[in-house]
Image (cartoon, rainbow, N blue to C red):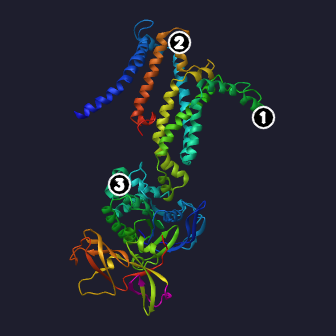
Amino acid sequence: MNGFRRDAGWYALILPAFLLMSVFYIAPIVQVLAISFTEPQPGLGNYERLFTSESIQRVIVTTLRICLITTVLALLLGYVLSYRIALSSARAQRWWILVVLVPLWISVLVRAFAWVTLLRRQGLVNNTLMEVGLISEPLALVWNEFGIIVGMVHYMVPYAVLPMLASMREIDPRLLAAARGLGASRGEVFFRVFLPLSLPGLVAAGVLVFIFSLGFYITPAILGGGKTLMVAEWIGLQILDLIRWGLGTMMATMLVVSILATLAVFSRIVDLRRIFGSGA
Amino acid sequence: MSVTGHALAFRGLTKRYGSFTAVEDVSLAVEQGEFLTLLGPSGSGKTTILMCIAGFVAPSAGAILLDGRDITALPPEKRDFGMVFQGYALFPHMTVAENVAFPLRVRRLGQAEREAKVRAALDLVQLAQFAERLPRQLSGGQQQRVALARALVFDPALLLLDEPLSALDKKLRAELQEELRALHRRVGRTFINVTHDQEEALALSDRVAILNHGKLVQEGAPAALYERPQTRFVADFLGKSNFLHGRVREVASGRIGLTARAMLLVQNLPDSTPRPALGTPVLLSLRPEKIMLLAEGESAENEAAGRIATWSYLGAGFSLVVDTPDLGPIRVVLPTWRAPIAPAEGLQVRLGWAADASVPVMDDAA
């Protein structure tokens, strides 16, 4: 009884935030998503299009492909970076983390346009390659899937680093010394001890990056040049340009559902608190 | 398990970190099958020496020899030494059996041979029934035994132990000390142990090397170190000791006479040791348990009267501090069983000790 009363006090403290979230955030979202069942006429008509419309299917497949490639690349780059950071001195770690976090403070819009100037036909990359003589024609580096993936991986690497670094820092360095003392080479120490122990962080980072990528809007819109559509941009197009609220909100609903489903699946494998960085 | 130990020696071992010298010119030979303990307070360089032997730390100068072969430049995984780490360093994602199999797996042993050896190693430490548990499901003592099994399973040339018992509570520590000693006899291997616990060092080792400030102070069998410390540091670090300051008054065959203020002291001194000159200061180490309380009419070669300043009851013994006018406070330990007196503060007592109870030590003022 006593415990309940103490808990009730804590819940009272959370109550204002809870009310604010439900009245001004969750309720409007549910209301918007409900449009998918009512526009243009009540029923599951919008959802039928998932199975009949090739263009919708193409958008979904493109989105999944880009997100998977982005996740794999961000994990690879992020893992190497985290490994390097985790093994450096405490002082060096602070600098590394600062360097990793700086891109997060720069607007996603600025970063996307920066990539455009680098990757366009007369951009720095193409000009350099042509001057060196490696290519004679400019490469199509932007306004396609390649450009989107470059921009997204760049955005996602810090999000991949943080959970992986957290789990690598929990690895007792004495375990690595012990493995070598017991006869393991550096490679074996990594594959038999370090990698398995950092796996929870790797999975957590993968889930975080993948979910984040699914809803990406600005980066694909700018670097895709309107030719490669991902789900978020497609939703924007339906609602803002074509005024097809039913179809747009249907896709939004699918996005929310697939994110929740991904979380539900992975919550059985990894501790979700690790992904969101709470509960040390 | 085979009963072949290997001999290890290091010569002029030195490790500097910038301007700080962690280990300074330490030379020591460990014989085949010997249990050697490196004993010292924290910062004495004992762990650095162990890490040099294991190959994790490269010495700034000096050589490490295994059976006469120079291994100073060999990486740790090529040295074939078993090691029990402080806190055991068991792999948390592997079962007990997988932990023990790890050294065999990285040595590419066949599965049948691997399983047989793991079973034998777990039997050795009486943990066969815990093979499928994870380390976190075991008690501290059991984890320690897994670490031992893992360090011994590949028939290492040497077993290195880094404070193997420090994480355990006192009672368990005593139990595992006996186990470790029995294990050493069973496997007949060379063990090198590092500890700051002098009781552990005395109980386990064939030989103890005492280190202080990166230097080797004294080495020898536990009893020799305890009974005949050469310096004040050794006498003080290994057990407890009283220190008596005196000046040489006379030198005779086999003994010397000293003055300590108004008091005369008699000290045995073998003729083989150099004779001190008259008037030189001498420091004597006198163990508290070698002092008797003299009853009325009893006498001893050395006698000092004083008053009990404080006393405490320790179960097996009484610990007294007796204030004497000439020697200052003297610590005395008496067995409680049939103690000659009932201690009380302020009680006047007479202390006595034989001329061979104390030993002259060098005052290294540590």
**Residue type (three-letter) at the residue carrying disc 3:** Ala
Give the residue type at disc 2. Answer: Gln
Q: Are marks 1 and 2 on the same chain?
A: yes
Q: Main secondary structure of the magenta part?
A: loop
Q: How many marks?
A: 3
Residue A73 lies, with reference to residue B43, above or below; the image says above
Name the foreground residue: A243 vs A85: A85
Numbered tag placed on residue A132 in the rendering: 1
Question: Residue extending furthest bottom?
Answer: B253
Secondary structure beneath label 2: helix
Q: Quadrant of residue B343?
A: bottom left
Res B227 → quadrant: bottom left
Badge 1 marks a residue whose secondary structure is helix
Q: Could you tell me which residue is drawn at 46 percent across and 81 percent down?
A: B282
Q: Residues within 10 Å of mark 3 (few under 14, many from 20)?
A: some
Which mark is on residue B144?
none
At horizontal 32% and vertical 30% (from top left) the residue drawn is A10
Q: Between residues A185 and A118, which one lies in front from this camera angle?
A: A118
The residue mark sitting in front, 1 or 3, is 1
> Residue B26: x percent and y percent?
54, 71
Q: Please, is residue A259 above or below residue B131 in the view?
A: above
Mark 3 and mark 2: Cα distance apart in space: 61 Å
Judged from the image, the secondary structure of the residue bearing numbered disc 3 is: loop
Where does the magenta region start and end? B259-279
Residue holding disc 2 = A238
Residue wearing tag 3: B131
Q: From where the camera sits, is residue B295 visible?
A: yes
Asked whether disc 1 touches disc 3, contact meaning CB atoms under 8 Å apart, the reply is no
